[in-house]
Image (cartoon, grey):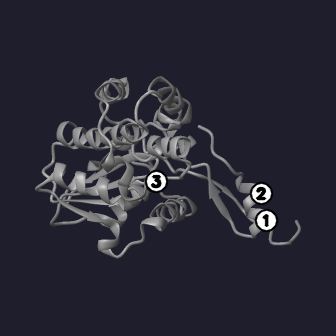
Amino acid sequence: TLQLGDGSVIANQTGIDTVYNFRVADMAVGGQGAPLVPYADYMLFKSNTKNRALHNLGGISNLTILEKAKPMEAVIAFDTGPANMMIDYAMQSLFQTPFDKNGEVAKAGDVIIDLLDTLLANPFFQQQPPKSTGRELFGDTYTAALLKTYEAYDKKDIIATLTEFTILTIMDAYQNLVDIPLDEIIFSGGGANNTYLMERLQEALYPIQVLKIEDLGFDSKSKEALAFVILGNQTLHRQINNIKRATGAKQSVILGQVCYANKGGSL
C-alpha cells in the first residue's frame, strides 16, 4: 500500500501528535488494509431498530451493512466497484470539466452496450467479500484505454455508459451480496450530489428508503475525516480498530503508527 505524507513531518510541522499509516497493521495479519471507515460507521450509525447501510460514493463505491442490534463483529463491508473515478476522468478528458454536474451529460446520452458488457466482465465483480479495489484496477490508465477503444462513439454516450456501470454494480451488490433486508441506505460522498445518479439508485433500490447523510445531520464532506479521527483516537488509547470481516484480517489489531510532536524540550 502507498500512503502519501509522513507522520513525522506532519507532527513536527504542526506541533500535533499524529497517527498515520493505518492500513499496514491490518495487512500484516492477512487483511487487505481496507475498508477502514466501517469501524466509524458502526460507532456513529448503529441502530437497535433499523437495518442500515452506509454507502460512500467517492472515487470508489463502498458499503457498510449494519444489522440492527448486532455487535461490531457482524458488520459487513466491501467495495462494489468504481463510483465517480471513471466518470470524472472521462469528463476531464472528453469535456474538459472536472465532473458531470447533476449527471446532466449522462442523462443526455445512451448506453453503449458493448462497452457496458466489457466493464461488467471485469473479474472483480465475481469476487465474494471481503474485497476492495481502487485506482490500480479502475483508475486513469484503465479508463484512458477504454476511451481510446471507444473514441468513435458519442462522448455523451460514454459518460452515460460509465454512469450506468456504477448504478448496475451497486444494484448487483445489494441484490446478490447482501442477504439482510435493509430499512434504509444512507449515501455520502461526491456522487451523492449527482441528482441523476441518486434518482436512478432510488428507483433501483425501492422499496428501501434512500437518504443522504445530511438527512441525519452529518456533513458528507467531513465524514471520512471524522472517521479517521475516531480511528486515531482508538490508536492513541491502544484500542483495536479494524473489523476482520470487512478487511479479511485473521485477527483484530490496533491500526496506525503514532508520531509525537517535538514540543521544544530536550532529553
Residue 170's tag is: none
Residue pointed to by mark 1: 13
Q: Position of residue 185 (x, y in %)?
A: 24, 58
Residue pointed to by mark 2: 9
The CA distance from mark 2 to mark 1 is 6 Å
Give the quadrant of the N terminus: top right
Of 65 and 186, the residue lying toward us: 186
The structure residue drawn at horizontal position 22% and vertical position 66%, both measured from the top left corner, is: 47
Q: Quadrant of residue 8?
A: bottom right
Question: Is residue 120 depicted above or below 5 in this figure?
Answer: above
Residue 240's tag is: 3
Question: Is residue 10 depicted above or below 140 in this figure?
Answer: below
Q: Contact, CB < 8 Å: mark 2 with mark 3?
A: no
Q: Badge 3, how many Cα within 10 Å: few under 14, some, many 20+?
A: some
Q: Amino acid at mark 2?
A: Val
Q: Badge 2, how many Cα within 10 Å: few under 14, some, many 20+?
A: few
Residue 29 in sight from this viewpoint: no
The structure residue drawn at horizontal position 17% and vertical position 40%, both measured from the top left corner, is: 175
Q: Would you say 131 lies left or right of 176 here?
A: right
Question: Is residue 63 depicted above or below 228 in this figure?
Answer: above
Circle 3 — which element?
loop
Q: Amino acid at mark 3?
A: Ile
The CA distance from mark 3 to mark 1 is 28 Å
The structure residue drawn at horizontal position 37% and vertical position 25%, both measured from the top left corner, is: 122
Of 50 and 146, the residue lying toward us: 146
N-terminal of the two: label 3 or label 1?
Answer: 1
Q: Position of residue 40 (x, y in %)?
A: 41, 60
Q: Position of residue 41 (x, y in %)?
A: 36, 60
Give the quadrant of the C terminus: bottom right
Circle 2 — which element?
helix
